[in-house]
Amino acid sequence: MTALDAATASYGFTGTLYNSNSYLTLDQMKVNAQYILDYLRNRGWTKNAVCGMLGNMQTESTINPGIWQSLKKNHHSNGFGLVQWTPASKYINWANAQDLEAANMDSQLQRILYELENGEQYYATHAYHLSFEAFSKSTETAYYLGCAFLHNYERPKNSFQNSTRGRQATYWYENLI
């Protein structure tokens, strides 16, 4: 049994995750999204919070841990992974230091948990005054949490994406179990 098999067997996941430097289809995203939901709920996150994050991951990476920004592989100054860590080297160097495979789903989820525990990447804003810990436990709507994650974690150049990411978060909330 591989380490990934052991990690996923603890909560019943037996499928195949999608991981490539390509855009995923909705059906492929659903597989990865359900895995992320199960993984983080087992670590105390609410479904609302995970779906808020998934609404952002859908835009950032099509919920694909192996994707590079604009599909430009190994451009370490660009984004990489589920949340498009930018520069990619920020995440990749951390994964390498932890002896983790950078493109691995569990490695990236471990990084998100590391950021939560160490106060990195996510910063409360005036409009969404939630700490990362409060975000992870929140029962606010998935739409609201999708907007909070957009502004407090992702902080893209084009921040006028509330409706897109909020709707995507709501979709995941309504379509995952």
Image (cartoon, rainbow, N blue to C red):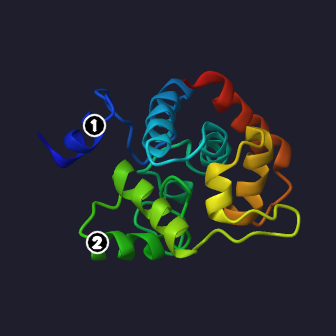
Is the N terminus in the top left, top right, bottom left or bottom right quadrant?
top left
Q: Is residue 141 visible?
A: yes
**Residue 119, placed above or below residue 5:** below
Residue 42 figure quarter: top left
Q: Amino acid at mark 1?
A: Ser
* Residue occupied by mark 2: 98
For residue 43, side relative to residue 78 (left or right) = left
The residue located at (82%, 50%) in the rendering is 161
The residue located at (29%, 38%) in the rendering is 8
**Residue 123, placed above or below residue 140:** below
Secondary structure, mark 1, is loop
Q: Mark on residue 89?
A: none
For residue 26, side relative to residue 124 (left or right) = left
The residue located at (46%, 52%) in the rendering is 67
Residue 129 figure quarter: bottom right
Residue 74: % across, % down = 40, 66
Residue 150: % across, % down = 73, 56
Q: Amino acid at mark 2?
A: Gln
The residue located at (87%, 69%) in the rendering is 126
Of marks 1 and 2, the one in the foreground: 1
Between residue 172 and residue 76, name the one nearer to us.
172
* Residue occupied by mark 1: 10
